[in-house]
Image: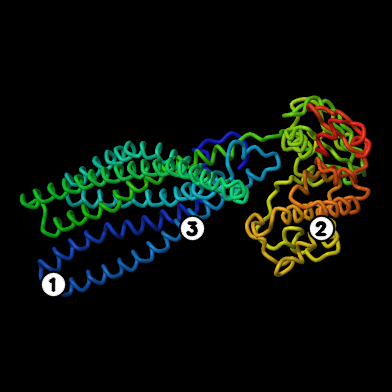
Amino acid sequence: MGTGELSGRDVLSRSVGGQRRRVALGAALGSVHQLGEALVPVLIGVVVDQAVAGRDAGRLVLWLAVLAVLYVCLSWSFRLGARAGERGAEEAAHELRLAVVRRVLDPRGGAEADRLSGELANVATEDAKRVGAVNMALMSGISAVVGITVSAVALLLTSVPLGLIVLLGTPLLLWLGHLLSRPLERRSEAEQDRAAGAAGVAADLVAGLRVLKGLGAQRAAVERYRRTSQVSLAATLRAARAESWQTGLVLALTGGFIALIAWVGGRLALDGSLTLGQLVSAVGLALFLLGPLETFAWVNAELAQGRASAARIAQVLSAGPAVTGGHEPVPDVVRGELRLRGVRLGGLDGVDLDVPAGRLTGIAVTDPACAEALLSCLGRESDPESGSVELDGVPLTRLDPARLRAAVLVAAHDAALFEGSLAENVAPADAADDVLTARATAAADADEVVRSLPHGAATDVGEGGRSLSGGQRQRVLLARALRAGPPVLVVHDPTTAVDAVTEARIATGLREFRQGRTTVVVTNSPALLSVTDRVVLLDGGRVHAEGTHAELARTHETYRTAVLA
């Protein structure tokens, strides 16, 4: 699924289309099952008329044997049909989850705009599951149609009035069931929206748990989640009430319909128009109809919820990209020269900046918004509102974003660690013990972290690296960025959570490890800026001064205030 405009109907169509064969197989087997179920009361009526009423033991044994074979067929057709339907539903949900994840991870971005990570997770899990379940609902609905059709034909052959009641009454019931599902569809969409919001807030709070504890803001955080959760609960209860009303009313209508069939059948038996066996068959078929009609009530509910979830998935899949254009490959040899001309974005106000190839450049800022905007431009998370950013003379907007990010790696200070060992976070599993990994770990002073852990580099760091302190996480993140070895590395505040001695070691290690390759350090740390070849000061959204750290610290008051204050 691409990033073009999609509707909920498109998502449903693709989900069902991808499982067409399994839905058809499940529907065929389900239809066989429904046919067999409908034949059971017919055969019982035959047994009553031909064997019981006629006191014929031979015919009784024969028809009981036929019933036994029929029940064997019922058992196998149900098992195989249910398996095909469930597999179709699960595989459709799986494909939708992959589509959502691919869209979220698309190098051009955009899917995450105005959405919390927990909300996206809810779309990829619960919404995908509900849309996948539509395949099972369709299979069941087709089988139910076959069951009702067979019952109507059998009743027509038994009694024309009974058959006509079924043929005319069933479409009316289906139409009423569809009308009753409308409120459920609306409230189901609201329910999923609120649930996704609650999941997003929960994920946000868990990710910032350390900060909340440090600020003593646990009570405020719990209160925030309680309010969000209460809104979600209210939406869930409204959806549950809508579903209960829809199910209850449909069942009441269905019960009235079955009672009508039984009443007409009884009147015909009293008139002598039906034999005892035919009356038994008619009542049995009427009772059998409860199953298919209840199935239709369930199908309507599933389709209502599936349509609501499909609309939410469509919003993610059709979200516009954050950056457009860019299809040229990055050259095999990247010198690493960066150039910004008249760049305006966020806090940047017409920045002109040259970053020489193979040098270590420091960038100090008086406004953190300038740092964020600069990192966004260099990593091409956003394109400038005006101006251009170039790599070796080629505008970044012409380069493929995925390949560009392999050449220009922007290592944000708040990047995440993943579940797994420290070694797996620093390097790929097949290269965790190589020399380059050891050098990168030492340069980031993360070897001290390794020595402090109970199982060394094999120690599991937990989700998001929560078993590590803030300073330890920063060192592991820096080691990972160094180990990647891109032609251009941009790091942002990699030492804010470490002590001064450790920071000095990291500064020296960073310079030695990246010797001869383009490196940009966006920071106000004097220890890091002191090892750079050149420092640029951004003030008021523009380049305000350039020089070495020592020169600027000695001659430039704004720089001293920003870096040394």
Q: Label 1 neighbourhood size at 10 Å, few (<14), some (14-19), many (20+)? A: few
381, 225: nearer the viewer: 225
The x and y percentages for residue 150 are 29, 52
Q: Residue furthest left?
A: 271
Query: In the drawing, does residue 161 fall left or right of residue 101?
Result: left
Q: Depth-wise, is mark 1 or mark 3 nearer the camera? A: 3
**What residue sits right under mark 2 in the picture?**
445
Of the two numbered discs 3 and 2 on the same chain, state the one appearing first in sequence.
3
344, 41: nearer the viewer: 344
Above or below 295: residue 455: below
**What residue sits right under mark 1 in the picture?**
56
Query: In the drawing, does residue 283 fall left or right of residue 312?
Result: left
**Is residue 17 something that shows in the picture?**
no
Discs 3, 2 touching: Cβ within 8 Å: no
**What residue sits right under mark 3 in the picture?**
87
Helix, strand or loop status at disc 2: loop
The x and y percentages for residue 24 are 45, 52
Above or below 5: residue 23: below
Look at the image and tell me in which quarter the C terminus lies. top right
Question: Which of the 4 quarters of the picture holds residue 301?
Answer: top left
How much space separates mark 3 and mark 2, taking CA atoms?
50 Å
Look at label 2 and name its amino acid: Asp
Look at label 1 and name its amino acid: Asp
Helix, strand or loop status at disc 3: helix
Which mark, residue 105? none
How much space separates mark 2 and mark 1, taking CA atoms?
94 Å
The x and y percentages for residue 397 are 78, 33
Look at the image and tell me in which quarter the N terminus lies. top right
Q: Label 2 neighbourhood size at 10 Å, few (<14), some (14-19), many (20+)? A: many
Look at label 3 and name its amino acid: Arg
398, 149: nearer the viewer: 398
